[in-house]
Amino acid sequence: MKKSIMWLFAVWIVLASAPVGSIAQTTDDDEWSDFSEDFLPDVSFKFRHERPVIEPTFSMVSLKHRNMQNPLLANSGGFDLRLGFAKKSEYKYSKSLVNYELNYAFAGYNTANLAVASSDAGAVESNILRFGFGDKNGIGYEVDTDVAIVPYHGGAALWTQFSADPLPVDTLGGAVLAPFNDAFRFGKQQEAGVLVQFTKNSGITLGYEFSIVYPRHLFWYWAGSEIIESIGQGSVDKFVRAIAKSSPNAAPIVSFILKNGLAYGMYELRKKNMNWPFNTAPAMSYSAFKVGFNFAF
């Protein structure tokens, strides 16, 4: 099984790094551009985007683990700060639509002391420190000059330090939380939301984050699971582009529903098997309603 994943990963990387010129000799440039955008990872590691962005957000957080039923984990609240570069451009298939993309680094802190919703009696309180790197993108409606409504899908690689206050002693809950407690663990963040730009330089974001934190990182199983999801997301992009060619105004909503629907489905599966479809340990789940401000410079 591991060898199969290694071969799949190697082919994926080779395709991603192949020179565009050699492919273009036998394939139409637009088709190759569409294929590489849909299915291949961006391995350039360049900030190619135009406008610096600062995006602070407030989150109302719920933590869960399928093997921890009593006691439960307490609700928490906190803040994230994203710093990145954004690009907004005219959508290829309609002048009334825009493409929006934000690449960012972020850091955040959550604590039970900032929780908005109450928790069950005896719930385990925690403090959470996290950071990571990600992007969010979507097709939006241009309402007026510099005014747009952009439904988006976002994702990030993140590292999370969970600190129980206190860690349950001599209980199943303590054993479940021990691999996460007081250590930075790798995870995957995904987010569905809407960016409303009021002016060229400001806007608000409303989003729902659904993330998982791995008790340990099994690289080849993780890579296999990620490739499967990437192929699915690439197929969604291809389908949305086909819709955009005939009904461009439907593209933003269809893209939002399908991309986030696929991502949420994978999130639910990974709560039981952190590297689905491979039989691995359950992950801790992190979900949050988020409100933020978007400042572009």
Image (cartoon, rainbow, N blue to C red):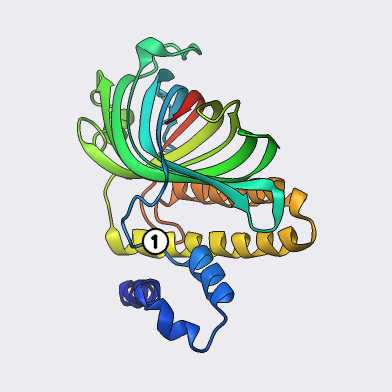
Looking at the rendered structure, the secondary structure element under dot 1 is loop
| Residue in the image at 27% along x and 34% along y | 175
Vertical side of 159 occupied by 270: above or below: below
Q: Is residue 239 left or right of residue 178?
A: right
Image location of residue 179, percent across then percent down: 24, 39
Q: Quadrant of residue 192?
A: top right
Between 94 and 39, which is closer to the camera in this rendering? 94
| Residue in the image at 54% along x and 84% along y | 27
Please rate how many residues cluster around mark 1, counting C-alpha atoms within 10 Å: few if below 14, some from 14 to 19, many from 20: few
Between 295 and 261, which is closer to the camera in this rendering? 295
- The quarter in which the N terminus is drawn is bottom left
Res 35 seen here: yes
Q: Is residue 109 left or right of residue 37?
A: left
Q: Which residue is mark 1?
A: 42
- Amino acid found under the numbered disc labelled 1: Asp
Q: Is residue 210 left or right of residue 242?
A: left
Image location of residue 188, percent across then percent down: 39, 45
Between 265 and 151, which is closer to the camera in this rendering? 151
| Residue in the image at 69% along x and 58% along y | 93
Image location of residue 104, percent across then percent down: 37, 40
